[in-house]
């Protein structure tokens, strides 16, 4: 079928909207409330077009055969400008000084400053140590509410009030920390005005960097290296690992380690736990790398908390190793170490603050501070450090060497694939011939895979996005049997984390995922148990996976309704 847009014919498929067709063919139609992963609601009225002579919102108007569409008439331009004017008038002036979707749309429609002043001072919400809300910047586009409800099935936030008094707040009028929020940060990722952001840590980071008495150590998560370049004009998925290491040294960090190393460490502990649970018939085992997923399980499916792996996330394992193993090797008091992590995730901020994440006995958190990918980009720009111009450097030893298995943690299915590479070896005593388990890769919300080990079929499942996790857990609750399950809270996995540069659509996430697997493919060592640095850590310090020391430093318990499991 064909549609006529601005006097030119374009093909389309049944069920497509005018906006979708226009976007596919590079025809510009400004939007503010539309998001490719959400059902369009036509709230902002910015995407107006003329369809067969009638003014409609292009985001939720289905195309029809022979439909005649005009997108750029003077009348439409005037109406759009008026709509954007009213929206811009509803936010605090600071919002209009920042680079965000609203200010970019203002430029597109030719609006320099708003004509009206509807703004009222509203209370901000900084109750959460992962996510902050400032309703003075909110334009009530509905993206965050929809994403929390439809994609994540958490329902922590909702609309309150009407008209220009409409705001987003915690369900029941509660502060965010008192709701069912799991700190995934997807609301911040889709917010067009930065009314919802990660809990900001840049100022504290700058103070830490100025402290010359402390040894400043930082780690970089797998997903950061394939996404931060977007903030500096590089294409989605461009691998900038060495450049980040160089930039962090220039910022003032003394040592830069790779979280991929502790991802390998996580696999050693988790795969060993899986083998133990098979023998003890305590299945399924759920992966535990994603703190937002952990909160989701505790909040909505407490009966499955006993199935969560006790292994800490790679971030927390690295934190513990820095302030014990590395401090000992350097003969440094752990109290004189500042340990920082760069993560794609807002929930990692909350995770680092948990009381049980102080296993190093340094008198404080194993991870002192967490910056998101967005925050690091902001800090580098503030210090006028251009990532594109940095000369690549290598990670420091001994916690900087990693396998390909550690690299793929950033993509949905990556943790499971990495774990099976090692679990197979531990159970069979020989290597898995093909390290690539492609059935666990891809965009599907729930992926399943069966592998035969020691004559038994091991059934695995992978879910990303918490609404998909809910569907999978409901199946297990109903009696369906799985042996090993991976859940990542964010769509696509950590590459789509709440602290990442904001993607325009799924194609950006896809490019990041491809880059993650490219890193794995390039590695000479692709299995965690073959990483020489991992072997060295066990021989020198931990002895063996699941040893007494490993359990103390690398494992955890879960709080549930006043109890600890």
Image: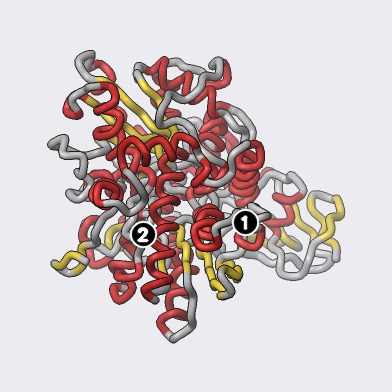
Which residue carries the number 2 mark?
A: 163
Question: Mark 2: which secondary structure?
Answer: helix
Q: Position of residue 362 (x, y in %)?
A: 16, 35
In this rendered view, identify the residue nearer to me: 74 or 139: 139
Question: Mark 1: which secondary structure?
Answer: loop
Residue 84 located left or right of residue 238: left
Q: CA distance from mark 2 to mark 1?
A: 60 Å
Q: Is residue 278 above or below residue 359?
A: below
Q: Of the numbered discs in the image, which one, if any, rests on residue 544?
A: none
Local crowd at mark 2 within 10 Å, few (<14), some, or many (≥20)? Answer: few
Q: Is residue 236 visible?
A: no
Instruction: Please tell me which residue is depicted at 59% across the width and 39% down the height of the picture.
Output: 525
Q: Position of residue 303 (x, y in %)?
A: 30, 76
Comparing marks 2 and 1, which lies closer to the viewer?
Answer: 1
Q: Position of residue 10 (x, y in %)?
A: 84, 55
Q: Is residue 92 above or below residue 561?
A: above
Position of the C terminus, as image quadrant, is: bottom left
Which residue carries the number 1 mark?
A: 432
In this rendered view, identify the residue nearer to me: 47 or 123: 123
Q: Quadrant of residue 379?
A: top left
Instruction: Please tell me which residue is depicted at 65% across the width and 65% down the height of the picture.
Output: 61
């Amino acid at each position: 079928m064909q549609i006529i847009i601005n006097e030119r014919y374009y093909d389309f498929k049944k069920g497509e909207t005018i906006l979708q067709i226009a976007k596919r063919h590079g025809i510009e139609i400004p939007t503010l409330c539309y998001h490719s992963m959400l059902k369009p609601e036509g709230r902002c009225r910015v995407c107006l077009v003329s369809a067969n002579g009638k003014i409609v919102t292009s985001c939720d108007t289905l195309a029809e055969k022979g439909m005649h569409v005009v997108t750029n008439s003077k009348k439409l331009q005037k109406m759009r400008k008026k709509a954007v004017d009213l929206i811009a008038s509803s936010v605090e002036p600071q919002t209009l000084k920042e680079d965000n979707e609203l200010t970019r749309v203002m430029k597109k429609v030719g609006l320099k400053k708003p004509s009206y002043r509807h703004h009222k001072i509203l209370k901000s919400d900084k109750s959460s140590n992962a996510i902050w809300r400032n309703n003075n910047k909110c334009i009530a586009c509905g993206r965050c509410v929809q994403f929390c409800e439809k994609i994540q099935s958490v329902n922590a936030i909702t609309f309150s009030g009407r008209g220009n008094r409409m705001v987003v707040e915690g369900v029941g009028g509660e502060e965010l920390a008192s709701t069912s929020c799991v700190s995934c940060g997807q609301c911040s990722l889709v917010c067009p005005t930065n009314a919802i952001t990660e809990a900001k840590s840049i100022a504290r980071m700058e103070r830490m960097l100025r402290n010359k008495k402390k040894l400043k150590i930082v780690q970089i998560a797998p997903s950061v290296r394939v996404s931060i370049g977007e903030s500096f004009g590089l294409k989605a998925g461009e691998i900038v690992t060495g450049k980040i290491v160089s930039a962090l040294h220039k910022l003032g960090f003394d040592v830069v380690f790779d979280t991929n190393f502790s991802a390998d460490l996580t696999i050693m502990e988790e795969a060993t736990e899986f083998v133990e649970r098979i023998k003890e018939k305590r299945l399924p085992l759920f992966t535990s790398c994603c703190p937002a997923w952990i909160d989701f399980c505790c909040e909505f499916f407490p009966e499955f908390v006993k199935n969560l792996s006790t292994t800490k996330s790679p971030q927390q394992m690295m934190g513990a190793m820095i302030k014990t193993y590395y401090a000992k090797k350097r003969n440094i008091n752990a109290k004189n170490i500042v340990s920082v992590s760069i993560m794609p995730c807002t929930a990692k901020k909350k995770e680092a603050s948990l009381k049980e994440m102080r296993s190093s006995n340094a008198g404080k958190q194993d991870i002192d501070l967490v910056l998101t990918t967005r925050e690091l980009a902001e800090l580098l720009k503030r210090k006028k450090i251009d990532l594109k111009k940095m000369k690549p450097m290598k990670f420091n030893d001994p916690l900087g060497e990693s396998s390909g298995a550690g690299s793929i943690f950033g993509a949905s299915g990556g943790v499971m694939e990495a774990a099976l590479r090692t679990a197979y070896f531990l159970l069979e005593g020989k290597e898995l011939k093909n390290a690539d388990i492609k059935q666990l890769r891809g965009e599907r919300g729930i992926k399943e895979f069966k592998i035969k080990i020691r004559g038994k079929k091991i059934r695995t499942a992978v879910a990303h996005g918490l609404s998909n996790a809910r569907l999978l857990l409901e199946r297990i609750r109903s009696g369906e049997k799985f042996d090993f399950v991976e859940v990542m809270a964010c769509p696509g996995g950590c590459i789509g984390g709440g602290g990442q540069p904001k993607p325009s659509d799924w194609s950006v996430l896809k490019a990041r995922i491809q880059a993650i697997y490219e890193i794995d493919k390039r590695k000479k060592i692709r299995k965690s148990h073959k990483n020489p640095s991992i072997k060295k850590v066990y021989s020198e310090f931990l002895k063996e996976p699941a040893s007494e020391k490993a359990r103390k430093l690398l494992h955890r318990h879960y709080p549930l309704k006043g109890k600890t499991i």
